[in-house]
Image (cartoon, helix red, strand yellow):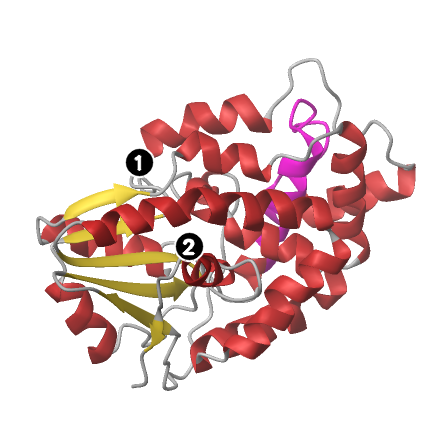
Amino acid sequence: MISRLKASLLVLTTLAAISFASLAQAQTVTTQPVPVKPAMWVIKDADSTIYLLGSIHVMKPETPWLNPAIQSRFDSAQDVWFEIPDLDNKAAAMPVAQKYMFDPQGDVASGLSPEEVAQVNDLLKPLNLNTTMLKAMRKWAVGLIITMQQVNQLGYATDTGVDLTLVKQARDANKGVHGLETMEAQMQALVPETEEDELTNLRATLTDIETMPQDLDDLFAAWKAGDTEALGHLMIDKMQAEDPKNYQRLIVGRNAAWEPKIEAILAGKGTTFITVGAGHLVGPDSVIAMLKAHGIRAERINY
């Protein structure tokens, strides 16, 4: 499950603009605040400073993650970069979702056993949906909806996530808001390569659904503690082993595309704050490892 969950959380910034409330009645749970210190790095040269914050795209409401150390560095930046710049743009997100999440000629139930169809319908029931209503939706998208419904039921939400919170602050403060990739490019990264891959991923979601609460809690706890070793194990090692295609597409390829853009930012002047999913900043193929290979050192901030 961790690889499917990771794939969903990695690219959720695109779908955050589409309210799943239109499909689901999301449930949230109030939790007791605990200290949160997510991992953050700094890169400097003579006239530039770049802060790198690893985010998680969902959040339990009332989690005090925006601590003074993060806020002060964010406030000091003239420009802010995210995976995509318009992650809260519903008008832009909807046609992208329609393009990649639906196949008018398809049938989401094709290839599934009657028992699997019944399980999908049972998991969609809280959203007042079923496979007949979603017949034209692609299997990977149905799996994503099931995953996000489970995430919501566990008390996590997208609208209080790091990315959406900071993009709103950046606009309110009239900072420059930029993206390392486009909304469509991010969606393309999520879509499995073949129909067989889609079926495999949906079946894996159904098989591993019971492990999701522990997987997500472990992931969230590691992120809150800034435990990069645990994040690397949970988000990278397992994904690489369980789903190498997704790993190459979602991690390696995208990191390789982002690294030269960060080099270009460093070549300029001023202070910049970059927020990307935490999984892109840990492991042997991380953005930080790629920067190091080009002679650029990112130093972990202790706070």
- Circles 2 and 1: CB atoms closer than 8 Å: no
Q: What residue is at 70 percent from the left and 44 percent from the top?
A: 245
Quadrant housing the N terminus: bottom right
- The outermost residue toward the front is 295
Q: Earlier in the sequence, mark 2 or mark 1?
A: 1
Residue matched to label 1:
89
Amino acid type of the residue that numbered disc 2 sits on in the rendered structure:
Thr
Q: Is residue 68 left or right of residue 156?
A: left
- Residue 268 location (% of width, % of height): 16, 49
Amino acid type of the residue that numbered disc 1 sits on in the rendered structure:
Asn
Which of the 4 image quadrants contains residue 260? top left
Q: Secondary structure at mark 1?
A: loop
Q: Is residue 45 left or right of residue 17?
A: left
Q: What residue is at 27 percent from the left and 50 percent from the top?
A: 81
Q: What residue is at 74 percent from the left and 36 percent from the top?
A: 198
Which is more toward the observer, 129 or 104?
Answer: 104
Which is more toward the observer, 39 or 297?
Answer: 297
Label at residue 205: none
Packing grade of label 1 (10 A; few <14, some 14-19, many >=20) is: some
Q: Secondary structure at mark 2?
A: loop
Q: What's drawn in magenta, residue-wise?
A: 125-150
Which is more toward the observer, 130 or 245?
Answer: 245
Q: Is residue 4 left or right of residue 83?
A: right
Which of the 4 image quadrants contains residue 274? bottom left
Packing grade of label 2 (10 A; few <14, some 14-19, many >=20) is: many
- Residue 301 location (% of width, % of height): 31, 79
Residue matched to label 2:
158
Quadrant housing the C terminus: bottom left
Q: Is residue 140 above or below residue 105?
A: below
Q: Is residue 195 above or below residue 289?
A: above
Is residue 71 visible in the rendered structure shown here?
Answer: yes
- Residue 8 location (% of width, % of height): 57, 50
